[in-house]
Amino acid sequence: MSETVPDTAYINHAWSDAAWNPIITALYRNQMAAIHFGEYPVSFDSEEWGEIKEKNTPKNSINRLCEYNREGRIIAASYTGHPGLSGGRYVGTVGPAGTGNEAQNPEMLLLVCRFGTDVDPDDAIVDTLPLPIGATQSQIEPRLDELTDEASDYVRSVVEHGGAPEEQSDQYKILKGFQLNEMDVGWVWNQDFPGLWAANKRGTIMGWNKGNQHLYSAYYSVVSDENIDRVDDVYDILEKDRSSVWALSEGQLEALCGEYLRRKNDNYVELISAGGALSDADIFGGVENASREVLAQVTFETDTDKIKDKLQRLLAYDSDRYAADIWFFGPESQEQPLPEEIKGTPVSDVYVPIEAVFEEFETGLGPEFVDLLLAVDLTPGRPNI
């Protein structure tokens, strides 16, 4: 990857309680991203947030929040906790990844918010306090006078009680976050970037590694002056020399291979939708007017041992008891390291490189289908919430 291209990450505002909706709306309107792991400590220092036990502990999340703003990231910020904002997400930059003056000295934001279903979104954020990255509670406390009286009083109560006072626990929330760089953010709709949609990440805040080509293509399409007509155009920006099949999401690859089976086999029909419904296969189909079924596995996996395991599980279905046409769609680079035979079946008889499938579509089997999978066709506007 080019050194000038920032890494990618995501933040999900997925609070399901309707009492969060005014706060989510306010964050969306202000192009902010924030997390909430309790009221106390009032700190951006991850060392004050306890031990690391899981990926999404408060300690890890606070550390990532500060790291992204310190080092700069392209961020996907979704606001799906609000039903009116589930159709897309912001893509933009934080910290030094931005191009405006605001990116030169990134700050964290301590947000004091009103909580409840009856709160007007315009009043949901009581006040914000800009702070240095990694600010400790002892560094924050002397600056609480910079907040409005309402916000300052609540934060002081939290510090005094070591958490939210019982009588106020359902009235306010303290969030930690940052502002997306003003000149480097735009809204993208899910239907315009189905690969991005399909590659949705769970959890609160983390790096977006697998499938990040979709986030890059969304960002460079919406925010930059780069000419992005298809998702795979982003590989020129990322300085990657690889087959365009790798620009697909996992779900799109399954769709491509399912369509390949249909176009290459007369009377082929899909019997179960491609996806996670099957334990050892991704596609289950059959051939009309014939007494045989079709099972296929589809993967981007590049670990040889995992490929071998997947193939062994799939080939177990081809037996005297249960005859089936077996197809294994995997990376070209992973066919050669495999043994010549598995369970008595020559690997070359069942292994189909995904790069070859994509090339066959592009060169005649269905270039229009590939265009549908990878085309970038932007819908203007964003939710009016």
Image (cartoon, rainbow, N blue to C red):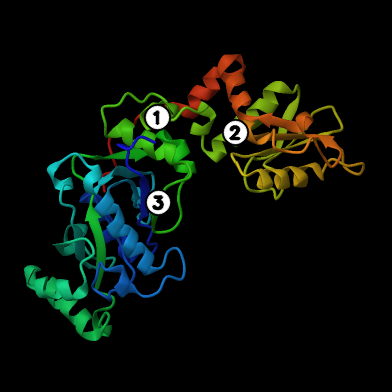
Question: The disc labelled 1 sits on which kind of residue?
Answer: Glu
Q: Mark number for residue 97?
A: none
| Mark 1 crowdedness (10 Å alpha carbons): few <14, some 14-19, many ≥20 | few
Q: Nearer the viewer, residue 173 or 107?
A: 107
Pointer 2 residue:
255
In the image, residue 107 sits, relative to residue 331, either above or below, namely below
Pointer 3 residue:
207
In the image, residue 131 sits, relative to residue 305, either above or below, namely below
Q: Are marks 1 and 3 in contact (CB under 8 Å)?
A: no
Q: Is residue 353 left or right of residue 99?
A: right
Between label 1 and label 3, give the one nearer the viewer. Answer: 1
Q: Secondary structure at mark 2?
A: helix
Residue at left 34%, top 52%?
Answer: 79
- Say which quarter of the image contains residue 303: top right
Instruction: From the top left corner, tell me how far across and down residue 284 is, in percent.
Output: 72, 39
Pointer 1 residue:
239
Instruction: From the top left corner, tell me how far across and down residue 180 is, in percent.
Output: 23, 48
Q: Is residue 12 left or right of residue 144?
A: right
Q: Is residue 368 left or right of residue 226?
A: right
Q: CA distance from mark 1 to mark 3?
A: 20 Å
Residue at left 42%, top 48%?
Answer: 208
Question: The disc labelled 3 sits on which kind of residue?
Answer: Gly
